[in-house]
Every structure is written in structure tokens, then in C-alpha cells.
């Protein structure tokens, strides 16, 4: 519960257990990773692609991907030379126990839809300092090795079959 004006309690908004993972890359297979401000549960640096949950049940996957890319990197998925592609793949995984409090009681699993965003070149990005502390572009195999999440690494390893020439 959260306090609102007048001291009354407002219901807490829980995260929707549907999210996107967007692998941002160049035609040359350079991949953008962003480092979370909080380390991974095992204490290592938490490098990842863009991820984020739907804001509402009505928001479709594409809208979620476009919004999350803009919020997390400042990049516009619809900018000239950019191509956002829904890979038609989904991961279903258990939510880490330390993050269960973000979801409604009883929610234990998340569905993650995979997207690729091809940008013309490796460009600087603007991070939300509340969420991310650093960014870097790496060759795709090296980026996969740096990812904390196995599903994120697997998505990056699929990248060559989704890149348009």
C-alpha cells in the first residue's frame, strides 16, 4: 500500500507478469547492453538488454517494446533507419524470489516476448539513472557472455537468424 494525499492508503499497483526483452543491435551485430544499478542476486554485475513489463493488460507487445526502449535508452524504435521486429518467441520463467513482492499475491511466473531492434549504428544512449548505471556496445557473442540472464543470452545468440541484410 502507498500513502496518498490526506494520509489515506491507496492500493499498490502490481507489475503485470508479461514483459518484453528487446535486443538492440546494429546490422554488424554489435549489441547494446545496459547495466542495472542493482547487482544480480548472485552479486555479479547485471548486464542486460532492454526489458520491461506491460503497463496495462490492454497494452500490446509492440507498444510495450517501443515504450521500454524509449524509457530505458532514449532511442526511438520508429526513427529513420530503425527496424523493430517481433521475433514471435516467448520465454516463460519463474520470477526471482526477491522480486515476487512486485507482483500480485500468487504470481510466480512471467511471460517474456522477444523483439529485436536494428539501429543503423552503435550510438550513445541516455539511461534512467534510477535503473541503469552504464551502457556498452559489444560484438554479439561477447554480449551474450556478459548477460546475467540465460534467456537474454540465448536471445542474443539467436540474433544472426533475425538480422536483415
Image (cartoon, grey):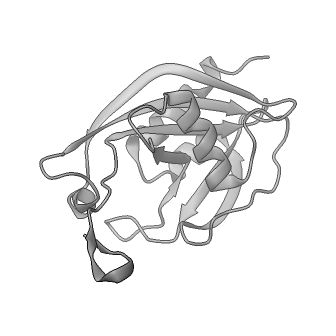
Quadrant that contains the C terminus: top right
Q: Position of residue 17 (x, y in %)?
A: 31, 42
Residue that extends furthest to the left in the rendered view of this protein: 106
Residue at 60% in and 57% down? 34
Image quadrant in which you'd find residue 133: bottom right
Residue at 72% in and 36% down? 77
Quadrant that contains the N terminus: bottom left
In this rendering, position of residue 150 left or right of residue 8: right
Residue 126 versus residue 8 in the image, above or below? above
> Between 102 and 120, which is closer to the camera in this rendering?
102
In this rendering, position of residue 1 left or right of residue 124: left
In this rendering, position of residue 78 left or right of residue 130: right
Residue at 27% in and 39% down? 93
In this rendering, position of residue 36 left or right of residue 84: left
Q: Position of residue 22 (x, y in %)?
A: 57, 38
Residue 82 versus residue 136 in the image, above or below? above
Residue 46 versus residue 76 in the image, above or below? below
Amino acid at each position: 500500500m502507498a500513502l496518498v494525499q490526506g494520509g489515506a492508503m491507496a492500493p499498490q499497483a502490481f507489475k503485470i507478469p508479461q514483459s518484453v526483452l528487446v535486443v538492440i543491435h546494429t546490422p554488424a551485430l554489435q549489441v547494446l547492453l545496459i547495466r542495472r544499478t542493482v547487482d544480480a542476486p548472485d552479486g555479479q554485475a547485471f548486464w542486460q538488454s532492454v526489458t520491461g513489463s506491460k503497463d496495462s493488460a490492454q497494452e500490446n507487445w509492440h507498444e510495450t517494446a517501443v515504450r521500454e526502449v524509449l524509457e530505458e535508452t532514449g532511442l526511438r524504435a520508429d526513427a529513420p533507419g530503425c527496424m523493430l521486429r517481433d521475433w514471435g518467441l516467448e520465454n516463460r520463467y519463474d520470477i526471482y524470489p526477491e522480486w515476487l513482492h512486485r507482483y500480485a499475491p500468487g504470481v510466480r511466473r512471467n511471460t517474456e516476448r522477444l523483439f529485436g531492434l536494428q539501429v543503423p549504428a552503435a550510438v550513445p544512449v541516455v539511461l534512467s539513472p534510477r535503473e541503469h548505471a552504464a551502457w556498452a556496445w559489444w560484438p554479439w557473442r561477447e554480449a551474450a557472455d556478459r548477460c546475467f540472464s540465460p534467456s537474454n543470452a540465448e536471445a542474443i545468440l539467436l540474433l544472426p537468424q533475425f538480422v536483415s541484410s
